[in-house]
Image (spheres, rainbow, N blue to C red):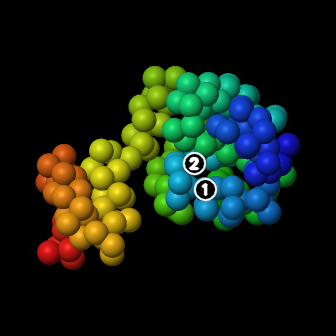
Amino acid sequence: VPFNLGMIVENREAQWQIDVLEADFQQAVIEHSHERPVVVDFWAPWCGPCTMLGPLLEKLAEQRHGAFLLAKVNVDEAQNLAAQFEVSSIPAVMAFVDGGPVSEFVGLRSEEELEQWVDALRPSEADQLVKQALALKSTDTQAAEDLFRRALAFDTRHEAALLGLAEVL
Protein backbone atom coordinates (compact mmCIF):
# COMPACT_ATOMS: atom_id res chain seq x y z
CA VAL A 1 0.00 0.00 0.00
CA PRO A 2 1.52 3.34 -0.97
CA PHE A 3 1.96 6.18 1.53
CA ASN A 4 -1.28 7.80 2.64
CA LEU A 5 -1.53 10.29 5.51
CA GLY A 6 -5.00 9.03 6.41
CA MET A 7 -3.55 5.54 6.74
CA ILE A 8 -1.17 6.74 9.45
CA VAL A 9 -4.06 8.07 11.51
CA GLU A 10 -6.38 5.11 10.95
CA ASN A 11 -3.97 2.18 11.23
CA ARG A 12 -1.82 1.88 14.36
CA GLU A 13 0.74 -0.30 12.59
CA ALA A 14 1.10 2.30 9.83
CA GLN A 15 2.24 4.85 12.41
CA TRP A 16 5.59 3.10 12.36
CA GLN A 17 5.80 1.65 8.86
CA ILE A 18 4.80 2.81 5.40
CA ASP A 19 5.44 1.72 1.84
CA VAL A 20 6.76 4.62 -0.21
CA LEU A 21 6.62 5.22 -3.95
CA GLU A 22 8.67 7.79 -5.87
CA ALA A 23 5.80 10.30 -5.90
CA ASP A 24 5.45 10.03 -2.10
CA PHE A 25 9.11 10.21 -1.12
CA GLN A 26 9.40 13.97 -0.59
CA GLN A 27 6.45 14.15 1.77
CA ALA A 28 6.71 10.74 3.41
CA VAL A 29 10.46 10.77 4.03
CA ILE A 30 12.07 14.18 3.60
CA GLU A 31 9.32 16.31 5.17
CA HIS A 32 8.47 13.75 7.84
CA SER A 33 12.14 13.52 8.88
CA HIS A 34 11.82 17.00 10.39
CA GLU A 35 9.45 15.50 12.98
CA ARG A 36 11.23 12.21 13.75
CA PRO A 37 13.93 10.05 12.13
CA VAL A 38 12.84 8.12 9.04
CA VAL A 39 14.60 4.85 8.27
CA VAL A 40 14.34 3.96 4.59
CA ASP A 41 14.66 0.28 3.69
CA PHE A 42 15.54 -0.10 0.00
CA TRP A 43 14.59 -3.70 -0.81
CA ALA A 44 13.15 -6.05 -3.43
CA PRO A 45 10.91 -9.10 -3.00
CA TRP A 46 13.40 -11.38 -4.81
CA CYS A 47 16.28 -10.41 -2.47
CA GLY A 48 16.87 -13.07 0.21
CA PRO A 49 18.76 -10.85 2.68
CA CYS A 50 16.04 -8.19 2.23
CA THR A 51 13.36 -10.63 3.30
CA MET A 52 15.37 -11.34 6.47
CA LEU A 53 16.26 -7.71 7.27
CA GLY A 54 12.78 -6.28 6.66
CA PRO A 55 11.07 -8.13 9.53
CA LEU A 56 13.86 -7.12 11.92
CA LEU A 57 13.42 -3.44 11.03
CA GLU A 58 9.65 -3.79 11.33
CA LYS A 59 10.04 -5.36 14.78
CA LEU A 60 12.29 -2.51 15.92
CA ALA A 61 9.85 0.09 14.60
CA GLU A 62 7.04 -1.51 16.56
CA GLN A 63 9.14 -1.92 19.72
CA ARG A 64 10.22 1.73 19.59
CA HIS A 65 6.56 2.91 19.32
CA GLY A 66 7.17 5.68 16.84
CA ALA A 67 10.67 6.77 17.78
CA PHE A 68 11.32 6.43 14.06
CA LEU A 69 9.26 5.83 10.95
CA LEU A 70 10.16 2.86 8.76
CA ALA A 71 9.70 3.66 5.06
CA LYS A 72 9.91 0.66 2.74
CA VAL A 73 11.01 1.36 -0.85
CA ASN A 74 10.76 -1.48 -3.35
CA VAL A 75 13.61 -0.71 -5.76
CA ASP A 76 11.87 -2.57 -8.58
CA GLU A 77 9.00 -0.08 -8.34
CA ALA A 78 11.14 2.99 -7.53
CA GLN A 79 14.21 2.70 -9.75
CA ASN A 80 14.69 6.47 -9.96
CA LEU A 81 14.86 6.74 -6.16
CA ALA A 82 17.37 3.92 -6.02
CA ALA A 83 19.48 5.74 -8.61
CA GLN A 84 19.09 9.11 -6.86
CA PHE A 85 20.44 7.65 -3.61
CA GLU A 86 23.07 5.55 -5.40
CA VAL A 87 21.64 2.25 -4.19
CA SER A 88 23.71 -0.31 -6.07
CA SER A 89 23.29 -3.23 -3.68
CA ILE A 90 20.38 -4.28 -1.49
CA PRO A 91 19.29 -4.37 1.18
CA ALA A 92 20.35 -0.76 1.66
CA VAL A 93 19.13 1.22 4.63
CA MET A 94 19.35 5.01 5.06
CA ALA A 95 18.29 7.18 7.97
CA PHE A 96 16.95 10.67 7.31
CA VAL A 97 16.85 13.40 9.95
CA ASP A 98 15.92 17.05 9.37
CA GLY A 99 15.49 16.54 5.64
CA GLY A 100 18.65 14.67 4.77
CA PRO A 101 20.47 11.37 5.09
CA VAL A 102 22.54 11.01 8.27
CA SER A 103 23.53 7.34 8.36
CA GLU A 104 23.37 4.29 6.14
CA PHE A 105 24.46 0.70 5.69
CA VAL A 106 24.26 -2.04 3.08
CA GLY A 107 23.60 -5.71 3.76
CA LEU A 108 22.15 -7.79 6.52
CA ARG A 109 22.80 -6.85 10.15
CA SER A 110 22.11 -8.68 13.39
CA GLU A 111 19.22 -7.55 15.55
CA GLU A 112 21.68 -6.21 18.14
CA GLU A 113 23.55 -4.16 15.51
CA LEU A 114 20.25 -2.80 14.19
CA GLU A 115 19.15 -1.81 17.69
CA GLN A 116 22.37 0.12 18.25
CA TRP A 117 22.14 1.79 14.84
CA VAL A 118 18.50 2.82 15.34
CA ASP A 119 19.06 4.02 18.90
CA ALA A 120 21.92 6.25 17.72
CA LEU A 121 19.40 8.12 15.54
CA ARG A 122 17.43 9.40 18.49
CA PRO A 123 18.07 13.02 19.37
CA SER A 124 20.19 13.45 22.50
CA GLU A 125 18.92 15.30 25.54
CA ALA A 126 21.02 18.26 24.41
CA ASP A 127 19.47 18.13 20.92
CA GLN A 128 15.98 18.15 22.41
CA LEU A 129 16.77 21.12 24.65
CA VAL A 130 18.28 23.06 21.74
CA LYS A 131 15.18 22.42 19.65
CA GLN A 132 13.01 23.83 22.45
CA ALA A 133 15.32 26.80 22.85
CA LEU A 134 15.29 27.60 19.16
CA ALA A 135 11.50 27.68 19.21
CA LEU A 136 11.61 30.22 22.08
CA LYS A 137 14.58 32.27 20.91
CA SER A 138 12.58 35.04 19.26
CA THR A 139 9.83 35.30 21.90
CA ASP A 140 11.49 34.51 25.26
CA THR A 141 15.25 35.00 25.20
CA GLN A 142 15.68 34.24 28.92
CA ALA A 143 13.95 30.87 28.63
CA ALA A 144 15.94 30.14 25.48
CA GLU A 145 19.18 31.05 27.25
CA ASP A 146 18.33 28.71 30.13
CA LEU A 147 17.60 25.85 27.71
CA PHE A 148 20.82 26.45 25.76
CA ARG A 149 22.78 26.38 29.03
CA ARG A 150 21.06 23.14 30.10
CA ALA A 151 21.93 21.62 26.71
CA LEU A 152 25.57 22.62 27.20
CA ALA A 153 25.56 20.91 30.60
CA PHE A 154 24.89 17.66 28.70
CA ASP A 155 27.30 18.37 25.85
CA THR A 156 29.79 21.21 26.32
CA ARG A 157 30.71 21.16 22.60
CA HIS A 158 27.18 21.11 21.15
CA GLU A 159 27.55 23.53 18.23
CA ALA A 160 23.90 24.56 17.94
CA ALA A 161 23.70 25.20 21.70
CA LEU A 162 26.88 27.29 21.64
CA LEU A 163 25.72 29.30 18.65
CA GLY A 164 22.22 29.74 20.07
CA LEU A 165 23.55 30.90 23.42
CA ALA A 166 25.86 33.39 21.72
CA GLU A 167 22.92 34.73 19.71
CA VAL A 168 20.63 35.27 22.72
CA LEU A 169 23.42 36.83 24.77
Element assignment for label 2: strand
Give the mark count. 2
| Dot 2 or dot 1, earlier in sequence | 1
- Quickly name the residue at label 1: 32
**Camera-nearest label, 2 or 1:** 1
Quadrant containing the C terminus is: bottom left
Left or right: residue 168 versus residue 17 is: left
Q: Residue drawn 32% across and 45% down?
A: 124
Q: Where is residue 108 in the image (x, y as percent from the top left)?
A: 58, 31
Tag 2–tag 1 contact (CB < 8 Å): yes
Q: Residue drawn 47% across and 50% down?
A: 103
In this rendering, is residue 160 above or below 123? below
The answer to whether residue 22 of the structure is visible from this angle is yes
In this rendering, is residue 49 above or below 92? above
Q: Residue drawn 28% across and 69% down?
A: 140
Q: Position of residue 41 (x, y in %)?
A: 65, 43
Mark sitting on residue 38: 2
* Quadrant of residue 16 within the rendered picture: top right
Amino acid type, label 2: Val
